[in-house]
């Protein structure tokens, strides 16, 4: 299993970072975990062919996590034409939100039929399933008060990865990562304490109890960028490629 970090910034683009996106190659499949608005430019910057993507899994319906999908659809419609189906996995409401957003951004073009099947699959917390040979385990995390937000565990090739999505602290974060090979965990703040994002001191306090083999922090806000020299845990960077072994 290999992960390429495409976007490790917060919603505000702190420090010039791109919004969330992680390309995973596993079990002969290629997929995105989240699709922030810069997903196309970052894939092209790092020499990755958008045509290789088999499916996209979205953690929650905030624009910095799914807002790149309209651009990906446009890419497959005109710029890198696609004929094979594209599957989009996400929390309840994913289909309506993605199609609404596509129409809002490209009203004229969204009226044209796509040359490929676009299939949506809703993920529910604690309802694991297999998708194209990849084990997917969605977990509930506290982030949006009125929508289901998910952390996503992926199993393939005998390896496992957990992606936190956006989340506040919950003791479930001591349970979900147990035994995974890689935990990609949001770290939006340094000193700010809010119930819907994590900060570095909280992660530092608990990381040894998480039970993951490797922990990489991501989704950096300006506080984390400004104080990164004080951080002793591993930080992601855009273009970072991690072989999960
Ligand atoms: Zn969010
Ligand atoms: Zn976010």
Image: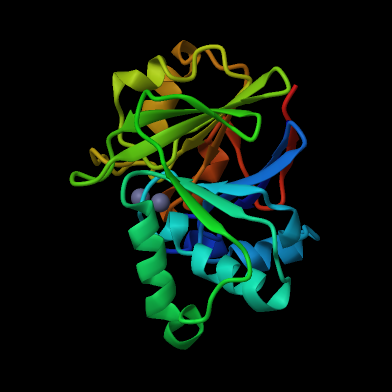
Can residue 11 be seen?
A: no
Color encoding of the figure: rainbow
Question: Quadrant where the C terminus lies?
Answer: top right
Compared with residue 154, is residue 149 higher up or lower down, i.e. above or below? below
Q: Nearer the viewer, residue 176 or 96?
A: 96
Tell me the residue at 72%/27% (across/down): 244
Q: Nearer the viewer, residue 155 or 183?
A: 155
Tell me the residue at 52%/37% (across/down): 230
Q: Position of residue 215 (x, y in %)?
A: 57, 26
Q: Position of residue 196 (x, y in %)?
A: 27, 41
- Left or right of 160? Residue 219 is left
- Left or right of 179? Residue 64 is left
Tell me the residue at 56%/17% (across/down): 212
- Left or right of 29? Residue 176 is left
Q: Quadrant of residue 243?
A: top right
Compared with residue 139, is residue 33 higher up or lower down, i.e. above or below? below
Compared with residue 157, is residue 198 higher up or lower down, i.e. above or below? below
Q: Position of residue 210 (x, y in %)?
A: 47, 16
């Amino acid at each position: 299993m290999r992960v390429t970090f495409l976007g490790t910034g917060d919603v505000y683009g702190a420090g010039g970072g791109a919004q969330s996106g992680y390309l995973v190659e596993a079990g002969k499949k290629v997929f995105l975990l989240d699709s922030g608005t810069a997903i196309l430019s970052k894939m092209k910057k790092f020499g990755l062919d958008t045509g290789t993507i088999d499916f996209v899994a979205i953690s929650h319906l905030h624009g910095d996590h799914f807002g790149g999908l309209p651009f990906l659809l446009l890419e497959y419609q005109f710029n890198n034409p696609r004929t094979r189906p594209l599957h989009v996995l996400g929390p309840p409401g994913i289909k309506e939100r993605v199609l609404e957003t596509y129409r809002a951004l490209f009203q004229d073009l969204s009226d044209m039929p796509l040359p490929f099947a676009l299939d949506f699959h809703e993920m529910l917390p604690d309802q694991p399933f297999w998708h194209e040979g990849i084990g997917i385990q969605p977990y509930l995390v506290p982030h949006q008060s009125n929508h289901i937000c998910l952390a996503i565990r992926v199993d393939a090739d005998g390896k496992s990865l957990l992606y936190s999505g956006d989340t506040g602290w919950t003791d479930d974060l001591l349970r979900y990562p147990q035994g995974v090979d890689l935990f990609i965990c949001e770290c939006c703040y340094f000193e700010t304490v809010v119930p819907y994002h994590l900060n570095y001191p909280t992660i530092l306090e608990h990381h040894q109890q998480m039970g993951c083999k490797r922990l990489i922090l991501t989704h950096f806000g300006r506080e984390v960028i400004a104080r990164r020299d004080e951080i002793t845990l591993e930080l992601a960077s855009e273009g970072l490629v991690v072989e999960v072994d």
